């Protein structure tokens, strides 16, 4: 029973990455970014390098540039989440933590005043979700809050996508 719940949490984390992040990455923001920027930046799947991010001073980052960071991060995470082995719950949570760290790093590059609050909220909610998953791994009886955690995380990433679309 304990292993089942831990496996369920790992599978739910993977499902969230595949559904939530790919949903956010394919939002209207993705379409808008593809229309208004070079498609090669989306297709490349690579996050802006620190030198690219530092070209624009903090506070002068365009909404388009901020949204491109979100879209690229979503695309990268969606691609990487396919590698998560849900048969090993601990490894799945470890991989999820790595992906969460990547998103956090990507989103820390967002300085646009309109997009940064939604990105920061998504990052904070993601941190809470990772903490929750670690708690479930330690004590599977805590898995009852999984639905609420997933909903909160999906909503925070949807808000980030909506901020880019608006």
Image (tube, rainbow, N blue to C red):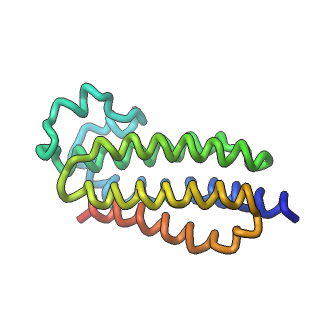
Q: Is residue 139 visible?
A: yes
Horizontal side of 140 relative to 162 (left or right) equals right
Horizontal side of 53 relative to 15 (left or right) equals left
Q: Is residue 34 visible?
A: no
**Residue depicted at 72% across the width and 56% down the height:** 137
Q: Hey, which quadrant is residue 136 in on the image? A: bottom right
**Residue depicted at 25% across the width and 56% down the height:** 115
Q: Quadrant of the N terminus?
A: bottom right
* Residue 88: x %, y % from top left: 78, 45
Residue that protrudes farthest toward the top in the picture? 51
Horizontal side of 146 relative to 161 (left or right) equals right
Q: Hey, which quadrant is residue 157 in on the image? A: bottom left
* Residue 143: x %, y % from top left: 70, 68
* Residue 41: x %, y % from top left: 32, 35
**Residue depicted at 27% across the width and 59% down the height:** 117
Residue in the foreground of this view, choosing between 144 and 85: 144
Residue in the foreground of this view, choosing between 63 and 37: 63
Q: Is residue 8 above or below residue 45?
A: below
Q: Is residue 55 above or below residue 128?
A: above
**Residue depicted at 62% across the width and 42% down the height:** 95
Q: Hey, which quadrant is residue 18 in on the image? A: bottom right
Q: Quadrant of the C terminus?
A: bottom left
Q: Is residue 41 above or below residue 59?
A: above
* Residue 71: x %, y % from top left: 37, 48
Horizontal side of 11 relative to 97 (left or right) equals right
């Amino acid at each position: 029973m304990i292993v089942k719940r831990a496996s369920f949490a790992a599978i739910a984390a993977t499902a969230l990455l595949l559904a939530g992040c790919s949903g956010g990455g394919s939002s209207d923001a993705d379409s808008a970014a593809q229309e208004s920027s070079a498609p090669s930046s989306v297709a490349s799947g690579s996050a802006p390098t620190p030198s690219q991010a530092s070209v624009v001073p903090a506070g002068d980052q365009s909404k388009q540039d901020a949204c491109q960071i979100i879209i690229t991060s979503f695309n990268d995470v969606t691609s990487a989440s396919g590698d998560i082995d849900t048969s090993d719950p601990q490894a799945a949570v470890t991989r999820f933590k790595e992906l969460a760290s990547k998103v956090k790093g990507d989103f820390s590059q967002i300085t646009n005043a309109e997009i940064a609050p939604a990105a920061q909220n998504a990052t904070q909610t993601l941190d809470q979700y990772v903490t929750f998953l670690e708690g479930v791994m330690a004590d599977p009886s805590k898995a009852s809050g999984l639905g609420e955690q997933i909903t909160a995380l999906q909503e925070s990433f949807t808000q980030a996508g909506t901020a880019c679309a608006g």
